[in-house]
Every structure is written in C-alpha cells, then in structure tokens.
Image (cartoon, helix red, strand yellow):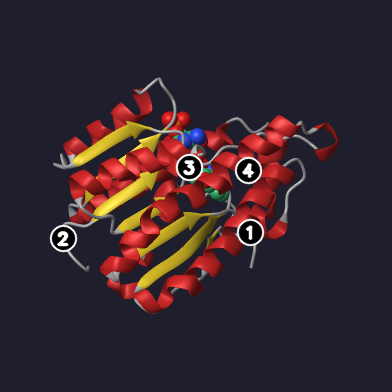
Amino acid sequence: MDGAERVVVITGGSRGIGRAVAMKFAEENARMVLLHYDPDESASSETLKMLAEKGIEKVESHKVDVSSYEEVRKIFDEIFSRLGQVDVLINNAGITRDTFLMKMSEQDWDQVLNVNLKSVFNCTQAVIRPMVKQRKGHIVNISSVVGQIGNPGQANYSASKAGIMGFTKTVAKEVASRGIKVNAVAPGFINTEMTKGLPEKVRNYFLSQIPMGRMGDPNEVAEVVFWLCSEAASYITGQVIHVNGGLFM
Ligand code: NAP
C-alpha cells in the first residue's frame, strides 16, 4: 500500500456497500471520514461500533447532504484544515426513486440526479485541487450495471449511473498526468437495504438473469474498490469495473 495512514473519505459510509468499504479500509488502519444523510444515526453508529470492534478509532462520521454543494464544501474545508489531506475519495452515496418514465415526477428525477450524480461532482471537485498538489490520490465512483444496460422503472437512476461513467473517464483523463487515478465500480444486484424493498417478482427476474445465480455481497464490491486504491492497481485509470456475477458481460 502507498502509506499506512491514508485519509479516506467514504460517502454513504453508514451502511450497505459504503460500510463494507469502510471495514475493508480498516485493514490498513486508514484514517476514515464517513458521510451519511439520515438524522437517525443508528446505521452510522452501528458502523462506528463495528470499526471500533476491529480496533479502529481514527474514524469520524458526519451527517452531510452530499447533493448540497455548500454542505460538501464546508465539510471538506473542515477535513482539510484538521487532517491536512485526502488520499482516497469513495463516491458511494446513492438513492433510488423508481417508477416508469410516464409517471416520474420532476422531483423524482431531480432528487436522484442530485444525490447520485451531482454529489460526485461536488465531492470530487472539493478534493481535486489538493490531490493535484500532492501528486497522488485515488477516486472511486460507485456506478451501477443499470447505467450500462438500462432497467425499466429506473430512467433517473440509470441516467445518474451512466453519468458517473462519463464523469469518471473525463476526470481520469484530466488528472492522470498528476498521479491521480479515477475509476468506477459498477455493481450488479447486491444484498443491501437498497435491494431489500424490491418486489418478489422483480427480485426473481433479476436472479434469473444472473449467470452465477445469486445476489452479490457488499464485501465482494468492497474488495474491488479497495484493490483499485492499492498499488496492485497502479496502472488502472478511467475504467468501469463490473462486479455483477455475469449479469452484464
Ligand atoms: P444503501 O444501503 O441504501 O446505502 C445508501 C447510503 O447512501 C447510505 O449510507 C445513505 O446514508 C447514503 N445517502 C443517501 N442519500 C444521501 C445524501 N443525500 N447524502 C449523503 N449520504 C446519502 O445502498 P447501497 O446498496 O449500499 O448502495 C451504495 C451505492 O451502490 C449507491 O450509489 C448505489 O446506487 C450503488 N449500487 C447499489 C447496488 C445494489 O444492488 N445494492 C447496485 C448497483 C449500485 P443514510 O444511512 O444516512 O441514509
């Protein structure tokens, strides 16, 4: 690894894939900042407890709406003034507001695009100048298989996730010469709260489309995210790595 004390910021770090990524970075004893949204802090408290059980105490959690440019600027100003740097940014926060396009409200569209895509702009822009100055850094954006293949009822979500792919490639090209790697991970159908609420029919349909015949575990996504931020992946930038059991090839 390139340093035992990296500062790692994970958006949506309170549960699901974000929590699994935090548990993975705990293995290198990283200094972590987790951002979440829900005023009910039970999920983020549980994550902090799980990290503490692993002996990780240099971790903090903040309630920040990552879709707000101002809130994001404020928290990153604080992070830089207290911790001095950000070495790894994982843009993971995301929501769904599924419905067919004919029924989709402007609010459903705006909310999903703002939380899933504008947040990636907000957070990446907040770290990019300092990362350019330090001549190193890793950014991993969590996209989705549906950004590639589409999915009925998810015009807003799939547009946001496809947007992440384009953003990732463009920023990767802009900063590659400064030692910064920008990649995306596109999970398939992963067992988290986001997929728990899906109707049985939709769940069964998805499962029937997955060659490996099962949902993914958040840890299987976290492994790839962590690897992309390691020396082992030192020549990889601008890529979208699919973690989907063969759902899309
Ligand atoms: P999840 O369990 O629903 O967790 C979502 C996370 O995002 C939570 O930590 C939540 O914080 C946070 N969040 C939501 N809105 C936010 C906001 N405005 N500001 C800051 N944080 C906010 O979802 P997940 O399944 O782990 O998904 C993580 C990422 O993977 C998302 O980008 C999702 O689109 C993507 N993904 C998931 C799947 C899947 O099958 N699960 C597949 C492909 C891609 P609170 O806990 O405070 O609400």
In this rendering, which labeled residue sits more in front, label 2 or label 4?
4
Residue at figure coordinates x 18%, y 36% from the top left = 52
Sequence-wise first label, 2 or 4: 2
Q: Is residue 160 left or right of residue 137?
A: right
Mark 1, residue position: 247
> Where does residue 69 sit, x and y in percent of width and height?
48, 41
Sequence-wise first label, 1 or 3: 3
> Where does residue 213 sit, x and y in percent of width and height?
60, 53
Q: Is residue 107 left or right of residue 127?
A: right
Q: Is residue 13 above or below residue 244?
A: above
Q: Amino acid at mark 4?
A: Leu
Q: Amino acid at mark 3?
A: Ala
Front in this rendered view, residue 154 or 223: 154
Cα separation between marks 2 and 4: 35 Å
Sequence-wise first label, 4 or 3: 3
Q: Residues within 10 Å of mark 4 (few under 14, many from 20)?
A: many
Sequence-wise first label, 4 or 1: 4
